[in-house]
Structure formats: C-alpha cells, structure tokens
Amino acid sequence: MQEAEKYSRYSFLLDKTAKRVKQYAKQRFRELGWTITIDQWAVLKQLHDKGEVNQRELATNTFKDHPTMTRIIDLLKDKGLIERKPHPADRRSFMIALTNDGDKLVNECLPEVQNIRMKAWENLSEKDFKEFKRILESIYENLS
C-alpha cells in the first residue's frame, strides 16, 4: 500500500469518526426532547463562556460561515435564547448575548452535554487521550 493511500484511509476514518460523534449527540438531543441543534448548542455555549460577542467573532469561534451564523442567530433569537444588541463602536454591527432563558438552558443542558462527550472517551486511558490530543493538534497545525 502506498503512503498516500494509507494516509487517505486515516483521513477518512477521522472524518467518519467526527460525523459519528455528531450523529450520537444529535440522537441524544432528540431523545432528551431538546429543541436545539448541535450547532445551536455550540453558539449558546460560546456565548455562555465568552459573554457578549459580535457575530464575526462568534462565527470564527464556532467555525461557521457568515450565512450559517446568521441563520443560527435568527433561530435562537426567535426561541428567545439570545438577543442582538447595538455594537458600542460600530453602528453596522451587533453584539450577540444570551438572554436569561438562554443562560438557564445552557446551565440545564451542560451536564448532559458533558455526558455525551464523555461517551466518546469511554475505555480510553489518560495516556490515550493525551496522545490523541497531541496528534490532532499536530494535524491542525500542519494545515494552518
């Protein structure tokens, strides 16, 4: 087997695993009766962690393009989970913030989201986890 073919198979496995993690989380969200998506959760969690941010920063931090982020923000705003506030230094821009309901939802969901994430790490040792993290960081840096 040629080197390129071998690495291609590993790349496929990485993609397949990332998709499976997202599918598992999506399934659990549905089973729990949550009315938010994985992508909406990522935005809510980012706002919970960082506080009020502009849309561009939110898109960058959640790896979403501008149109996708606009749709997610619109949906979350319609659900009453976030609000748009005028940007203090740029009239053309808005700051995005959690509402009280949004903050409450994040706090309610966080323990279960952590359980969902831990499912992926079952049967892996701390050494396995550290090595995996090192490898992923190397791949990420190679492509930066």
Image (cartoon, rainbow, N blue to C red):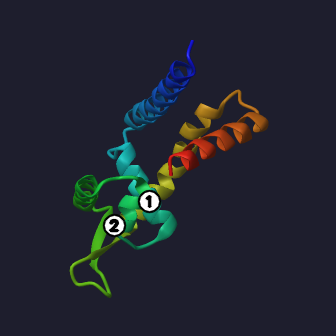
Q: Residue at x 73, y 41 (%)?
A: 130
* x and y, in percent, of residue 59 in the image: 36, 59
Of the 4 image quadrants, the one containing the N terminus is top right
| 111 relative position to 52: left or right | right
* x and y, in percent, of residue 62 in the image: 42, 55
| 138 relative position to 27: left or right | right
Q: Residue at x 34, y 46 (%)?
A: 36
Q: Amino acid at mark 1?
A: Asn
Q: Pick out the residue farthest to the front.
A: 2
Q: Is residue 104 visible?
A: no
Rounded to the nearest whole Å, what is the CA distance between mark 2 and mark 1?
Answer: 9 Å
Q: Is residue 38 visible?
A: yes
Indicate whether 106 appears above or below 37.
below
Q: Amino acid at mark 2?
A: Arg
Indicate whether 68 appears above or below 18.
below
Say which mark, if any, is on residue 33. Answer: none
Which residue is denoted by mark 1 in the rendering? 61
Assign a secondary structure to mark 1.
helix
Q: Mark 2 vs mark 1: which is more N-terminal? A: 2
Instruction: Pick the residue in front: 59 or 138.
Output: 138
Say which mark, if any, is on residue 56. Answer: 2
Indicate whether 130 appears above or below 91.
above
* x and y, in percent, of residue 120 in the image: 59, 32
* x and y, in percent, of residue 22 in the image: 44, 35
Location of residue 116 (image quadrant): top right
Q: Pick out the residue farthest to the top.
A: 1
Instruction: Pick the residue in front: 34 or 5.
Output: 5
